[in-house]
Image: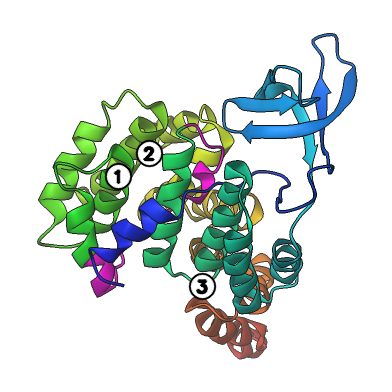
Amino acid sequence: MSRCSIHAVVVLQLATYTTTLVWTVPASAQDRVLVQQPGGSRFPMSGYIEDYTGRGISLRIKPNEPVRHYPRTDIVEVTTEYTPHHDRGRKLFAGGKIAEARDEFTEALNDEDRPWVRREILANQVRCTLWNGEYYTAVSRFIPIVQSDAETFHYGLVPLNWTDDQPAENLRLDAREWIGPKATPLSRLIGASWLLSVADGNMEAQATLKKLAREPDVRIQRLAQMQLWRMKLKGTSQIDPDEITGWEKFVEDLSFELRGGAYFVIGNAWKQRKEHEKAARAFLWLPLVYDADRWLSSRACFEAAESLSVAGDRNEAVKLYSEVVFRYGDTPWGPKAEAAWNELRQPNTTETKVR
């Protein structure tokens, strides 16, 4: 995809993800919403969902009645009918058949009219691309979600770089456009995160992130601040432990969807200090809890195994290496984990001779 065409895709693909969706079903079909009342009781409602955003849900009970609005915090469950393509896509993804799921979600997007359902389909497309580390494509699917719903609850899927790895060439090229003067704050955040590890783009990326760290949008602001930790880590041989503890408290105060990537940086900070058990605990947040970015989660799981191996916890290291092999074997860290796993399982002949 060319650098220009990605913006066209972004405009055309308005969408988001949440709990359940579909349209192109009979007009008589009804959506179902379970609402939490202030007193603690719950009551179900049926009707037609006009929209479901990060702010709340808009539900029309009957055609001649006004729309009712409920904040997202009061929504317990939402169910609706799916198109056949959407339903198959969800089942295929759950079964690990990602390529087939992507095809079904593409067809589902063509079938779907409701904006809130389209956003869910796009979010599922982001999940498919993150499964295979296709960050460039993930960007083109994620940005329209936020364009359609600025308060989306899908920020946990934002395709940022949290490592020092060099991005692919197409990412490097487009990232320079994404941080352009006319770009949105979200676009600049994504672009800067990928340019931060590029030698000739590092300074511009830092300047962009420092500006975004003062953004009115708290999510953009917090993510930019945490991205800057990468530079703090790179610019010193050893970060003060109190500062790392401060980072951990900072992350704990964030909404759930913003936390994931920061734990990878925190893990690297503890690893730099050779506090390997603390490093492993930080890395493990990703594969255990914040696993939307599957490639980053696999890398974090591998790093946790390495940290525990260095710390002398052979048994736990073996378990985590096997986790990488069986859960993330198709990622770049699968073969590395398998080699380390096989080595650790060999009898320690040196110790045997000494005894």
Sequence order check, earlier mark of 3 and 1 = 3
The residue where tag 3 is placed is: 132
Say whether marks 2 and 1 touch (CB < 8 Å).
yes
Residue 199 location, quadrant: bottom left
Tell me the SS state at disc 3.
loop
The residue where tag 2 is placed is: 223
Q: Amino acid at mark 3?
A: Asn
Magenta segment boundaries in residue numbering: 151-172
Residue neighbourhood size for the residue with mark 1, other residues' Cα within 10 Å, grouped as few (<14), some (14–19), many (≥20): many
Residue 272 location, quadrant: bottom left
Q: Amino acid at mark 1?
A: Leu
Query: Is residue 125 shown above or below 210?
Result: below
Q: Residue at x 30, y 47 (%)?
A: 187
Locate residue 90, reporting x and y percent: 72, 63
Sequence order check, earlier mark of 2 and 1 = 1
The residue where tag 1 is placed is: 189
Q: Would you say the magenta stretch is mainly helix, strand or loop?
A: loop
Residue neighbourhood size for the residue with mark 2, other residues' Cα within 10 Å, grouped as few (<14), some (14–19), many (≥20): many
Q: Is residue 259 visible?
A: no
